[in-house]
Structures are given as C-alpha cells and as structure tokens.
Amino acid sequence: MKKLSVTLITLLFAVFFSACDRQAETGEPASYVDPFIGTGGHGHTYPGATVPFGMVQLSPQTRLDGWDGCSGYHFTDSVIYGFAHTALNGTGVSDYGDILVMPVLGEPVFKNTEYSSSFSKSSEKAEAGYYSVKLDKPGVLAELTATTRAGYHRYTFPASDAANFIIDLQHRDIVLESWIEFVSDTEIRGMRRSTNWAKDMVWYFHMQFSKPISRKGIAVNDTLLADALRAEGTNIKAFAGFTTAAGEQIEVKVGLSAVDSEGALKNLTAEIPEWNFDEIRKQSFDTWNKELGKIRVKGGSDDQMKVFYSALYHAMLQPNTFMDTDGRYRGMDRGIHTAEGFTNYTVFSLWDTYRTWHPLMTIIEQERTTDFIKTMLNMYEKGGLLPVWELAGNETWCMIGNHAIPVIADAWMKGIRDYDGKEALDAMVKSASQNHHGLEFYRKYGYIPGDKEHESISKTLEYAYNDWCIAAMAKDLGRDDLYREYLRRAQSYKNIFDPSTGFMRPKLNGSWLAPFDPTTVDWHFTEANSFHYSYYVPQDISGLTALHGSKEQFAAKIDELFNTETEVGGRDMKDISGLIGQYAQGNEPSHHMAYLYNFVGQPWKTQQRVRRIMDDFYTPQPDGLIGNEDCGQMSAWLIMSAMGFYPVTPGLPEYITGTPWFPEMEITLENGNVLKIIAKNVSEENFYIQSATLNGKKYTRSFISHDDVMKGGELVFIMGSKPNESWGAGEGNEPVTTITEELILPVPFLIAPDARFRDVMQVSVGTIVPGCEVFYTTDGSNPDRNSARFTGPVTLNATTTFKAIAYREGFGYSLPVEGSFYKIDLNRKVELLSEYHPNYHGGGPEALIDGLRGAGNWRLGGWQGYQGTDFEAIVDLGSKKPVRKVAAGFVQDVRSWIWMPVEVVFSVSDDGSNYREISRVKNTIPVNDYEMRTADLGAKVSTSARYVKVKAENFGTIPQWHLGAGGQAYIFVDEIIVE
C-alpha cells in the first residue's frame, strides 16, 4: 500500500510538471506563473482565474471541508463539484466559494455527489488569468477567465439534447437567505447571504448565457418546482438546459456585487460587454504581465523564475477590490456607501501581511497602499476600530494584535501620506485603548498575565510593537504626550523576559510559569512556542540584546534557535513547519529572525540562513510552499529576500540586507525611477556578500534606507563562496533599533510554590534587572516607597493579595506585580482514574476540589482536559457524610474540539469498593452549538457516603461536519461539587 501511494504521488507530480511547464516561451513575467504552486501540501492556494487584486476568483471546487480545503481546492483531489466565483488565497480558515456553476449531461440533479465529476490531472491547465479542465462525467471541457468584477466561463459540450448547467446557491457554508430568478431566456440573477468565518457574507450575481435557455427550473430543498421563475430560501438551486452539437461551445458571464443585483449587472456590462472569451483571457494575461513586470529578474534558473513570479502572482491576488464600478460598496456597518477618492478593498490578513507584504507594497504599489490605508480608515469610521482581520466588510477578530497600526505607520514614515494623519493617529490610539483581548491587563500590569488572557506572551509582545509604531507616528505629528506614553508601553517586552532562561516566559499569578519548556506550544503563545516569540522585539533590538548581556551572547542565542536539536512539543500545530532547529519558516512569527544576525555584527550568518530558506522552502511544485500562503505573506518573504533586503521593523524606513537570489533584478517604481540590483557571481554556492556599491560608491552597511531604494540607481553586490566577516559589521555599518527615552523599570516577579496553601506559605520577590529596591503590600493596596521593604521571604497564613513594585534611581517605580494566594481547607482527597492531557493539567488533581472555579476562558489553564477518553474520578470526603448535591463543571468549545460529555454518572460508596448509582445526567447543549458554553451537570440527591465517583462519557470521534473530522474530542472539567 505504501508503494502504491508513492507511485500515485509521483504520477501526480509528473502530470503537474507536464501540464504546467510553459517554459516561458515569451520570456514575459506572466509566462512563468504557475498557479498550481501552493495548491498541495498546506499552501491552501487556488488555481482558478483572477486578475490582480480582483473581486472575482473563478476557481474549481474540489474539497468541501477540512483544513486543507480552505481555498476549496487541493491538488491531490480528483473530483470537481463545480466552479465558484470567490476564493481565499492561503488562509487557515475556510470561507468564500460562492455562486457555484457546474455543467452536466442528462436529467438535472441537485445533490453535489450526483452533479460532481471526476477529472484527470493531465487535462488540468492553469496560467495567470486562465484555468481549464476536462470533466470526465459529462465529457465537457471547462475554461475559465476573469475580469476584476466578473467571471467568464466557456464550456465545450458533446452532442446532447440534455446539456445543463447547475447553479448551486447552497454550496459551501451556512446559507442565511438566498434567491434566484430567471429574468430572460439568457439571463439569471440572484443573491446569496451566508455565515461562516465572515458572519454576514452577501453576494449578488447576474449571469448571462451565450445562447437562449431551452429548459429551466428551480429546486427548493433539492425538489424541482413546476414552472417557477423565482424562488427564495436557504437551499436554492437551479438549472439551465440546452441542446448542443458536438464541440459546441456555450459561454457564461457572471458579474458579482456585494451591493445589489443591479450593481452585479452594471459590473458585468462595464467589464465584459461583448462575447469574446479569448479576448478576455488575453486581456487578463496582459494585465498580469503588466503588474508582474514591475519587477524583472534575469539570470536565474527556470525553477527560480517560476518560483519568483508565482510568488509575485500570489502576492497580487489580494486584497480584493470590494466596490462596484460606480463606487458603491457594503461597509463595516453593513450599510451601502459610495467610495470617494479611493478604491475600497477587502481581505486584510494583517497579522500575516504587516510583516513583509505591506512593506513590499510600499515599494512597488504606493498608490494602492494609499487606497489600502484609506480603506482601513474608512473601516474605522464605519465600524469604530481599525481592522484586525477583515473579510467582505466583516471583522472576524482572527489572530492577535492591532496590525493596521504598523501598516499605517510604515507608510507614513516612508512618505506615503495622501490621507489624514491626525485621523490615522486617532484611530491607532482608539484601537490600542480598548478593554478587550487582554489590552486592559496589558495597560494595568505592563504585560498580560497568563492566567488572565490566553496567548499572553504573543499579545504582550505584539501590542508593545504596535505601541512603538504609535509613538513613532505621534512624534512625527508633534504629539509629544502620546509619543512618551506609547514609548513607555513599547518596552513592555522587558516585563516578560526571564533572565534565568533567556526566554520570554509566561507569568501566572505574578510568578513565572513552572515547569517551563521553551519548545512547548501552548495557549500562552499564538501558533508558537517561546522559541518563536523570544526574538520578537523589532522596535528595540538593542534593548533585547542588553537583556541577554551583549551582542555576542545574543548572537549565541540566535545560533541556538537555528542549531538546537530539540523538537517542537505541546499542541500539534500544522502551521509550525519548515523547521531549522526551532526556526519555523512555515509560520509568520519566525519570518524576521534570520535577519537578526545583522544587528549583532554577523551578517554573513544572515546570508547563509536566508539562502538556505529560499532554496529549500520555495520550490516549483504543488507543495512548493512550506506553510499557508496567508494572503501573500509567505510569498512576500521570498520576493523581498530575493531582492537582497528585508523589513525587520515596519515603521522604520530601513531594510536589512540579506543575500540577493538573482544575478540581476530591475524594480520599476511608480515615481519613474528604476532600482537595479546586480549580484555578480551569485549562485547556490556563492551567496556570501564580499563587497557592495550603491550608484558606484562603496557601500559597507548591512542595511539600506527606503529613500535610497526609491531613488533608484544601481546596487551591486560582489558574491563569493566564503563569508567576508568584515563587510556590513562594525559601528555605523550595523542596523540599530533602540529605545533610549522614557526607559522603564521592568516589573518584578513573585516566587511562590502555588496559589493555594493549607497552613502557611512563603512568598518571595525577584527582579529582572539587578540593583532594585522592592516594596510590597499584603492588603491589596498599591505599594510605594512608604510600604514594607522586601528583605526576605514573606510568610502568609491567610488568604492574601500580595503586590510588589521595584524602584531604582534614574528609573523610578515599576508597575506592580500582583498575586492572589488562597488558604483552603482540603480535608477531602481526590483520585483520578483517567489520565489528563499533559497540556491541560489545570493545576493537578486537587484543583478539581479546591473550590476555585476555572475561568470562562478555558485557555487560561484552570481546566483539566481529557482527549479521547472518559473522565473518571473519586472524591474521598474523609468520612461518611450526608450528600445533598453532586455535580461537575464542564465547558464546550466545538471549534477547539471540546464537547460537553454525553452524560455524567454519579455513584457513591461507603467502603471505596462497592458503588451504587445515585444520578445520571445527560447533556442538553446541542453538539453543533459553536458558542463557548460552561455548565454544571449534576443533581440534588439525598444520601450518605464517604466516596463519590464521577464518570463523564467523552463525545468520542469528531463527526464529518466538523473541520477536525476523525479526531478525538476533549472533555474539559473543573470543578467536582459535592455538598
């Protein structure tokens, strides 16, 4: 069986190369594009037809669910369900796939298992702006192309008196409402409103056929209605029938609008007024060629050329135009508005794209960058906040941080300023001043405690960087008050740096998380572990270096990242891929790390690491992306790295030198200048920079300013096979990011064995930097220099709120650290008969009977998790006692594989051996309820016993309708209640 699988995969790849190897006959950039790159593995891209930044993505639908079906297509599939008009490029969550069209022969059928068709990979072809495939079942050749707001289909049929098109408005997510209407013998229009990742997705369409429809019908709930010309509901489908001669072609044009059906017709009429598929295909290709031609590379291998231009193609798939030709659009307030002076866009995957994609756009797409920012400010005006992860006018709140902030600050600091800077700064400050997603704790404590908000380390670090961006823009705009406030906040990273380990370490109840393993992926980090976030201080790399002791010591720490042989542990995260040591190219938190060597005087190591990443993790194959494409970010890393420089700190108008990938590259800039980058002798072996010149003058810096890039000219590198350790190193030649004003004193940390104690407990206080005085209180008040001075361990003998501050001359006070310590009476004992998951210990067995309930957010660690097994435990009351109530607390979070137990059985015993059932409680929360729920399952009883046994039945194997289908469900429990 293993042999057969390998043979099949080899065959698929052979077919892939045969079908897609256009070999750049014209030498034009678009001829190198291979849309199949990234459609295999976990790339999550799609191969369908679209134009740069277009609203329509006309693409085959081969996969209905599952993580690797996020785009609706996967290269390994062999069945097509139809062709939809929207698709997302490389996301980790599924959406789009709207307005499905599928050709069939014979009687019209409305179930996708019946109208779907197998296809041969050898018949599948894709290029920039075009896709085609031969459908086996109907024997129909399907061809697709597109304009900005319209999709254009061409189908070549065999001879048939029953050639039909199925239009499926139920495909692919949950439909809230939809309607369809036949408006003439060649036209259909309709609307689809659905909910999924975007809670309120609205698309109108207007569809035209190149010949009159001879038969038609509408199905409601898969039942064909007699003589219906219009219908509405949540399961609406239709068919349009024709009689065809052998080889006859029927063309279909479909205009989209998020506004109304009239807008869809206007868009279609404006962009495809005539019937000429080949002309639109050529127009689409030429549009791509013009956009891709902004960067022209020479001298690379065929594989490099394919990889590079396919990456640039993927980078230009989004954001998507999100307005009609008359300027109308659907806003964040769900109202209809008209854009004045800008193009409105959608699909802002900002946690990903602020790092490299948006900085790339500040070089090659400055006019669009202005429109992107105007769009974001418009979202602020209509929705109240800057976007986090916007999709079709919906805020999804996906991922963390406020990364519209660095996008705006980066553009502003680079002189892209055709928008209201004061409004932009106001929007930044408002977004950073909310009391959600841990921001309230971040401001109060100077970091986010891990027991108050999940992903605390990642959020603290990303908020700190966001705050530095606000400070930079505030300073430029003359707002000194905001500059100083946010510069202090930008140093919050110092409060979570553990000098004893050299890692960013979570704090719970004021103390460092213990045990701590920097390789463990858990809920203190966003899709990452401490290795992946401990190098993330782009705004103050000098400050981070100082915490490590010296440049040499920080360089050794970067070496450890790449050289360690330890494996990633903890939660299974498919995003963490492309590993070199603990470095993970497959996910964004690592993307800047290879460039950090420049900051510590070792740029030759950056050159070696970057070349390896480009060569090993970007290949011209379906699985040629090492992780999700993430709306262009994965490709943008390659594009900018291939240029030879990279934006480590967006908001600072500088780029950090890496190693150029091509012998020659020309970047045509919108200001009319051309930057020519030449790498003499570059090859797989010759990736070390020996020397450089800029416009004929010796260039020794391992960084370059944005101004120098935009002035154009000639940047020449001499490359060699051995490192030149003197080039780019030394004072003045190394890049620097540093905070030198408003320096803060890091928050101290508490040292305590637990948050609970039976008799007495000692609490100590440590400081991150030496030479500090520490003052503390035990009455809940905020300490100052008049409070008790810490000189040694403090003994607690009652429930206490312990607060401490550090003080040092020249710095002043730190923010307070706070811990709550509970004295509990634990005469009871508990024995676990099931084994909890090591990532979800919830504080150990006694936490189930300590009287302290887990927070509503299970990610904070107060719950015990059991995967693929029932939960069973026995509580020993110490002696036989009356029992009036038994219960246990559970949580359900279906998205995270956590379900309520099917039922909970309570039994009692006097001797610990012979048990009798006293209650059986069934769960009543629907298994498909995606809201996070907590509930106590239990009952009032009247009995006496010493031992109480609780057994909760696990939900079991995850069903097919869930993205985790086939996996094993969790039970999360806290607390066991016996009264």
Image (spheres, rainbow, N blue to C red):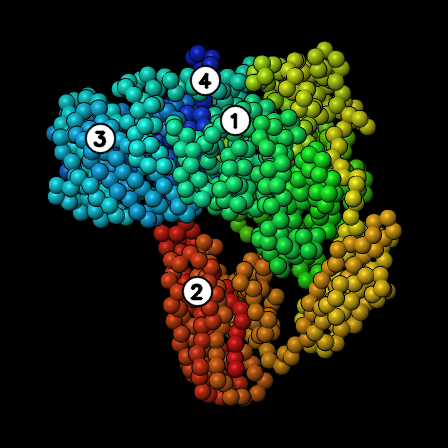
Secondary element type, mark 4 = helix
Q: CA distance from mark 1 to mark 2?
A: 48 Å
- Do the CB atoms of the residues marked 3 and 1 lie less than 8 Å apart? no
Q: What residue does disc 3 label? A: 187
**How far from the left and from the top, in percent, is residue 836?**
54, 64
Q: What residue does disc 1 label? A: 368
- State the residue at coordinates (45%, 17%): 289
Q: What residue does disc 4 label? A: 289
Secondary element type, mark 3 = strand
**How far from the left and from the top, in percent, is residue 745?**
79, 50
Viewer-side residue, 752 vs 431:
431
Q: Examine the image and state in which quarter residue 699 appears.
A: top right
- Do the CB atoms of the residues marked 4 and 2 lie less than 8 Å apart? no
**How far from the left and from the top, in percent, is residue 581?**
64, 40
First reached walking from the N terminus: tag 4 or tag 3 = 3
Three-letter amino acid code at the position of disc 2 = Met
**How far from the left and from the top, in percent, is residue 900?**
43, 64
